[in-house]
Each structure stands twice: as structure tokens, then as C-alpha cells.
Image (cartoon, grey):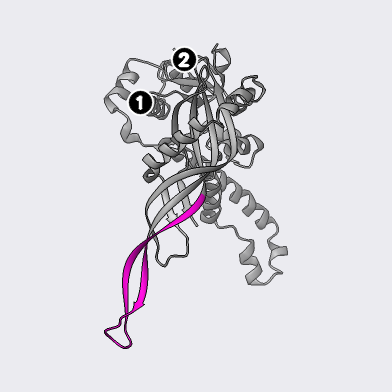
Amino acid sequence: MAKPISDQSSDIAGLKTRHVFMDTCEYEKYNFNVVHPTLTNLRQIADARVIQIHTTDITKNEIVRHVNAKVLEYIHHQNLRIERSKKWIDQFPTKFKQEILIDKNELLKEWLSQLDLIWLWSIDHGIESVNIAELFNSYFEKKPPFDDDDSKEFPDAAWVMMLENWCKKNDSLMYMITSDKAAGRAVSQSECLILVNNTEELLEEYNKIKNEKGVGLIKGYLNSANVIEKIKDEFNNNWKTIETDYWGEARDGKIDSMIAESVDAIYQTTVISIGNEIAECVMDVAVVLSVVIDYQEDVDDPEMEYSIRTYRDARTEYHTERVRFLVRIDTASGRVDGVEILSQFLVIS
């Protein structure tokens, strides 16, 4: 049975998993303001792919409802102020008066677009992954979060169930950030969900790794030829999982294939966790790629005096691009235990 992160004893320094979910109440605590320092810090390590944010359609719908209510409340207060100052406002030209008015839909759209920043690389989970029969069985058997009298916590029960199912399917753990007591009790029943009371607690856990003595040793391992070869193999085997775009000079160029020839530089390494057996790290590296480009070429047709014949051709170009990887290191031997591409989009330019 899971316990709050602060109560768990573990031999792992740093984060026990990259996967993180935030309940609606956590966003509400920061007034749905993604530029709040705490959410900014979280967003920065999410953008760096150190953590993987998860969200659900239930959570997003709840947030839209809350934000919509706040927008209506704000507009109501603004309209009261305008009404009180109507005589003063009437002195201005019609055009200026129109600029004072607030468009509810535009304000809501702008607010939600800011929230999209924190969900930029999120994994979204839909209600279709929930077993409805299992959900109602939990309700009738009064399992958390339905264990209180008259409890009807169906949204909380649904997102806990869908995220737990994902963890089981992917053999993974996930941090669940929520201060909701009923949801917390449901999370605590799971073997693969880790309860975190607030975002600050998660960030504190992440920052602990920076002071670990083993960080320097692990970073030393990351410079080995073994790591470089594994990175090249991972890219060559799985580059098609990345969304790619060609911005080079070849006319109407399209990427046909890519091969990682070498690693030119290591920009940044971030150690996420160090355990007794495995350390997890995020690496930003400059990969030298040989890229076969399918492109359009026009040539004069010798058989006709003024015509141009257009056809497709292919050529190989060499590009150095920044790619991000998750690397697992065997702490005893320093050898690579596994590599995974974290980059989701790559522009060849």
C-alpha cells in the first residue's frame, strides 16, 4: 500500500519516477496561474523532460469549469466598476468605450492557452480507459474515495483508476499530487501510485539529488564510449517515433531516412535518481546525422525547346541536431542498462 512521499523510506536518492500527475485542487491552489514560481519551476523541469506530466480529460474539464467561473466573476466585478463610472466613460468616443469592454470568450481562451504551457509535453488519458463496472463496484463496496458517508467522488475515482491502469500496463510508478483527502485515500491503496501532498514537496525531492555524492561519478560514466554507442543505436532504431520536419535548402524536401553517425557534443546531463542498482539521467547531446532527403528538381528537357521536366531525386545531407535521451546506468559497473529517446519533435535545418 502506498504512503505519502515524506513517509516512504527508500534507497533511491532523487525522484523515484519521472511520471507526475496534478489534481485539479493543486492547480486551483495557485489560482490556475502557470507563472506562479512553483509552477514555473515544475514547468521548467517538465520542458527539460526530466519529468513527464500526465493529465486526464476529467481534470481538464474540471479546470475549464473552474476557470470559466473565475472569468465570469472577474467580468462581473469589472462591469460593476464600469457601471459605477458610466457617466465618466460616456465622455469618451464610442471606439474607446468598446476597447474597455472585456470579451469573456477571449479572456477564457487566453487563460486556458497559458495552462497549455504546462501541458505542452503531457500524456493525456481519456475516460474510455476506465472500466465502468469496476468503477461502480468501488462505489457500492465503499472503497476509497467512496468510503465516506454520502460520498460520490466519481471524478476522483475515475482518474485514479485510469492512471493506475496506465502504470500497471507500463510497469511504472507515478507521483500523484493532490491535497484532496478522499482522492489521497484512493491513491494510498495503490502499489504503483505515490501520494504527494503538494508540488513543493515533489520539487524538494528532486532537488535532493543535486547534493548526492554519487552524482559526479554517474556523470563521469555518461561520457563513456559505451553510452555514446547506445545513444546512436537507440536513435537509429527509433527515430521514426519522433515527429520530424525538414527546413533545409532542398526544394520541397522530405526526410526519407536518418542515421546517427556520431555524437559531436554533450550539452547537458541531469541525474534524476540514484538507486542501489540503477541511476536515471537525462542527456542533451549533439548528434551528427546523415539524412537522406527526397526532393524536387527541375531540369531543361532536351527534347523540347522551352519545357522544364520536374522529377523527384534523393541526396544525402549531414546535419548536427540536439536530441534528448533518458539513460539508465548500472551503478556498480557504469555500463548502460537502457536508453530511451525523450525528444518528441526534431527540425532538420
Mark 1–mark 2 CB contact (< 8 Å): no
Quadrant of res 35: top right
x%, y% of residue 87?
71, 63
On whether residue 282 falls in the magenta region, the answer is no
Q: Residue at x 30, y 83 (%)?
A: 302
Q: Which residue is mark 1?
A: 165
Q: Name the residue nearer the viewer: 69 or 76.
A: 69
Q: Assign the magenta stretch its main secondary structure.
A: strand
Look at label 1 and name its amino acid.
Asn
x%, y% of residue 325?
49, 36
Vertically, is 6 above or below 232? Answer: above
x%, y% of residue 119?
50, 41
x%, y% of residue 292?
38, 55
Question: Rounded to the nearest whole Å, what is the CA distance between mark 1 and mark 2?
Answer: 15 Å
Q: Horizontally, is 77 left or right of 291 in the view?
A: right
Vertically, is 306 above or below 327? Answer: below
| Crowd around label 1: few <14 · some 14–19 · many ≥20 (10 Å) | some
Mark 2 element type:
loop
Q: Horizontally, is 124 left or right of 80 in the view?
A: left
Q: Name the residue nearer the viewer: 272 or 57.
A: 272
Mark 1 element type:
helix
Vertically, is 240 above or below 282? Answer: below
Q: Name the residue nearer the viewer: 276 or 182.
A: 276
Please tell me which of labels 1 and 2 falls first in the chain. 2
Look at label 2 and name its amino acid.
Ala
- Residue 2 is labelled as 2
On whether residue 318 falls in the magenta region, the answer is yes
Residues in magenta, as a range: 294-320
Q: Residue at x 45, y 33 (%)?
A: 230
Tell me, yes or no, if residue 23 can be seen here. no
